[in-house]
Amino acid sequence: MGRTVRYGELLLGIEGAALFRNLLDDDDFAQQRIDAIRELAADFDGKRLSYRIDCPELDVADGYTAWAPTYDSINNVLIQAEEKLVASATRDLPVGTALDAACGTGRHAAWLAAAGHAVTGIDKTPAMLDIARGRVPTATFEIGDLTKLPVESGGFDFAICALALAHFEDPAPAIAEIARSVWPGGRVVLTDAHPTFVLIQGQAVFPTERGLAFVRNYPHLHGTYLAAFRSAGLEVRECLEAPMESDYTAGMFAEASVAAQAFWGDIPAALVWSLVKN
């Protein structure tokens, strides 16, 4: 899937979305959005708004292989929001053995190792693991799939899985595997793109030499997570949510920054579950 997106579509979409979100609130704001939409529509076939951006959909393996070289250098506001919530959820975490499932480039493995944990990272993308090994030389990293983790049952005091479950149409098998990895009484932190964010085009988009590409996120409602937690023997300690903090005056939304802020500003983007294994 995926398609070639016109720049004008991007701007019209954000202006229309901002108008709808604030439809009952402010006459002046509504008129500004209508005026902006009229101006964009009038110039829609012009050279500037007709600029086309390739945005193909890639599967997890191909997507993260392509993303690996730039993953840590891109300003990722979703990660910034997520990391603050993880810090809050783990502020009382005792030092022990830790699993970073779907570890990517090892951003969570790095702080766990620095805090004194014995860390094992598992990921299915060799290109991401190569970066993780260089970043956290004291940790152990292995190839593996979230739905069949190559670890012993109950082998860890703590497990984290970050921004990966939304790539599954059904997250339950992966959640069961993560739960299996910790002993009864062990802690689990799961982070994800918030379902509200995903439902309004919160995809895992990244730049490529040809334009953009994305790995699909599927929206998992809170009830879906809770059902999976019950089946896996996990009890919720905390559920944390946060919006992104972004400057829309730069980047792809710069020409519609007022609308972008009005639309995205307080939308929850990051979701973090703090859990304990029964």
Image: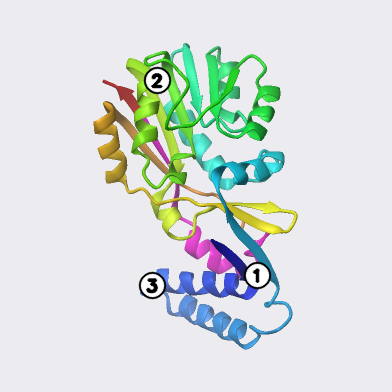
Q: In x, y percent, where is residue 220?
A: 36, 48
- The type of residue carrying mark 1 is Glu
Q: Which residue is mark 1?
A: 255
Taking the spot 38% from the left edge, 72% from the top edge, the residue there is 25
Q: Of marks 2 and 3, which one's residue comes earlier in the chain? A: 3
Q: Which residue is mark 2?
A: 181
Does residue 182 appear anywhere in the picture?
Answer: yes
The CA distance from mark 2 to mark 3 is 49 Å
Taking the spot 59% from the left edge, 69% from the top edge, the residue there is 10
Q: Is residue 253 above or below residue 186?
A: below
Q: Is residue 255 left or right of residue 146?
A: right
Q: Quadrant of residue 120?
A: top right
Q: Is residue 92 above or below residue 209?
A: above
Q: Nearer the viewer, residue 163 or 169?
A: 169
Taking the spot 24% from the left edge, 32% from the top edge, the residue there is 230
Q: In x, y percent, where is residue 186?
A: 36, 17
Q: In x, y percent, where is residue 185?
A: 31, 16
Indicate the colouring scheme: rainbow
Q: In x, y percent, where is residue 102?
A: 52, 32
Q: Which mark is residue 71?
A: none
Segment tinted magenta in the rendering:
249-274
User: Is residue 253 in the magenta section?
Assistant: yes
Taking the spot 67% from the left edge, 23% from the top edge, the residue there is 133
Q: Of marks 1 and 3, which one's residue comes earlier in the chain? A: 3
Mark 1 lies on a secondary structure that is helix
- The type of residue carrying mark 3 is Asp
User: Is residue 194 in the magenta section?
Assistant: no
Q: Which mark is residue 25?
A: 3
Nearer the camera: disc 2 or disc 3: 2
